Amino acid sequence: MKNHESFRIMLVEDSSTAAELANYWLQDGLGSDFVLHRATHLNSALELLRRRMVDLTILDLNLSDSQGLATFRAIHAQDRRVPIVVLSGDADESLALEAVRLGAQDYVVKSNGGENPLARPVRFAWERVQRYRAEAALRENNQQLQIARSVQQYLFPDGPPTLAGYDIACRCEPTGLIGGDYYDFVSLPDGSVGLAIADVSGHGTAAALLMVEVRATLRALTGQGLDLSEIMRVTNELLTPDLDHNFVTAFFAVLQPEARILQYGSAAQPALLIHADGTAHRLEAQTPPLGVHVGVSEISDEIKLCDGDILVLYTDGLVERVNPHGGLFGLNRMVDVLRQHRHQTAQEIVECVLLAVRDFADGIPQSDDETLVIIKVGSN
Amino acid sequence: MMDMQELRQRLMVVFIEELHECVGDMERHLQSLLRNPEPQVREMLKNELYRAAHKMKGAASAAQVPQIQKLCLQMQNILTSIRDGQRTMDDKLHGQFTKAVTFLREAETLLQNGETPKSGDSIFD
């Protein structure tokens, strides 16, 4: 397998006979999974390094255009990341020590006495190269994820909307740098506010990409005069071909702030309503998640909100958080926390719920994205 | 992957080609030195001789021809002492180098015929 992932070795050796023997040693030590570039002069070796064609240099110090440690210094200075094994005809210990001091990975003496002097150093170098490549790929991946995170953060609302008579707070904590949870607030032309929370199945990059599509679809449909059931139906029709084996649970709502009327629809994504007296009411409709199949009639319902009501939008990552004993945090525990802190501000309630979930988990890291939106009625 | 026998044969083929080329270079450098060139050119020619001797020493080691390896090492050491000012390339030494190159030329023929070169130890005595 000689491809770009192969081990690219530069043999700097002006003797064809010595190069032939070194090639044999390399095959003996590495099999055929390496690509050998031979340079007979310093200049051609430097050119190969400049073209980033080298993972390991095997270097004879004495060439027609450069001799001794000057050869090593020139090669090393060209690209310090490329390890160098000095292959010399001289068993000169002081030269070997000096070469290693200057940065050579190894100094081996040419001999054709049966033992392969290159086997160990090239295998060691190959391990280093593979580790370096893996680290570079990881760094690249992390950089890409950081960029993706920035983009995703930009897609979330800057903060909760300021609505007279409402106190709103929200938080999304993805499992990794990016996630598949989504929440949104959209101001509509008639003064009402669209609310959305959605959870794309899975998490990580794939879920995050689908989350972007959910957001784009929903944003494109809102404000076009469609009622909530129609928005959900069309969203489902548009998303289904793209979701493959994934699906999206979602809770969409339109809040008329002054009238305190909440119209909502749920695609397998419940919400909670905690009343001022502490009683809890689950808001949900028996419709499947988005993306499972087309032609589903989406159902919406309507409620009147009262002073002290708390509308709680959440994703399942919160209630499905596990502790070291395998227990689930669960909906009941979350309702208890909400009841207990219902007189506090929306932001404080968010913090209390997340803290309770973390305390329950007792060090077990989250395995799913966690999102919470608290909308408290009559708080300002 | 070649076996050791095949490797030796392959190395010998490459070595004979390299020896032929290198001996030709040495002959030219020695001829040029006889023409008593400018000091700078003399230095360059002696350096080229050193390079050729060093290269053939390594090649002979790889091909396991110890007689040539040893002779080339002697040439390399003498050229080092000349470079360091401990010896000069006088007529006698030039003659010895010429003999050494002749020895290498004959060794090339012997190796081509599958024979073993004799020792060249006495050349620089």
Image (tube, coloured by chain):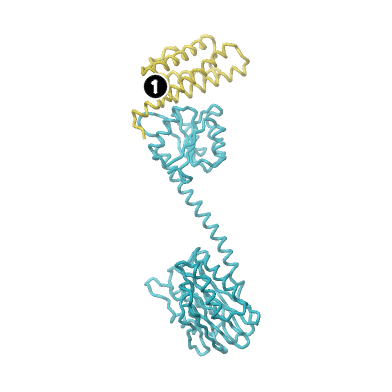
Chain colours: A cyan, B yellow
Amino acid type of the residue that numbered disc 1 sits on in the rendered structure:
Val
Outermost residue toward the front in this view: A295
Secondary structure beneath dot 1 equals loop
Quadrant location of the C terminus of chain A in the rendered image: bottom right
- A191 shown above or below A182: below
Please give the residue where the numbered disc 1 appears in the rendered image.
B65
Question: Split into 4 quadrants, where in the image is the N terminus of chain A?
Answer: top left
Residue A366 visible from this viewpoint = no
Q: Which residue is painted at 44% across and 18% down in the image?
A: B71
Return the residue nearer the eye: A362 or B31: B31
Identify which residue, A233 or A162, lies in the foreground: A233
Query: Where residue A126 appears, x then y in whole percent?
Result: 44, 43
Q: In this view, does A136 lie above or below A336?
A: above
Image location of residue A186, percent across then percent down: 61, 76
Neighbour tally class for label 1: few under 14, some 14-19, many 20 plus, Cα within 10 Å: some
Where residue B25 appears, x then y in whole percent? Answer: 52, 19
Of A259 and A351, which appears nearest the observer? A259
* Location of residue B111 (image quadrant): top left
Near-viewer residue (A79 or A106): A79
Horizontal and vertical percent position of residue A105:
47, 39
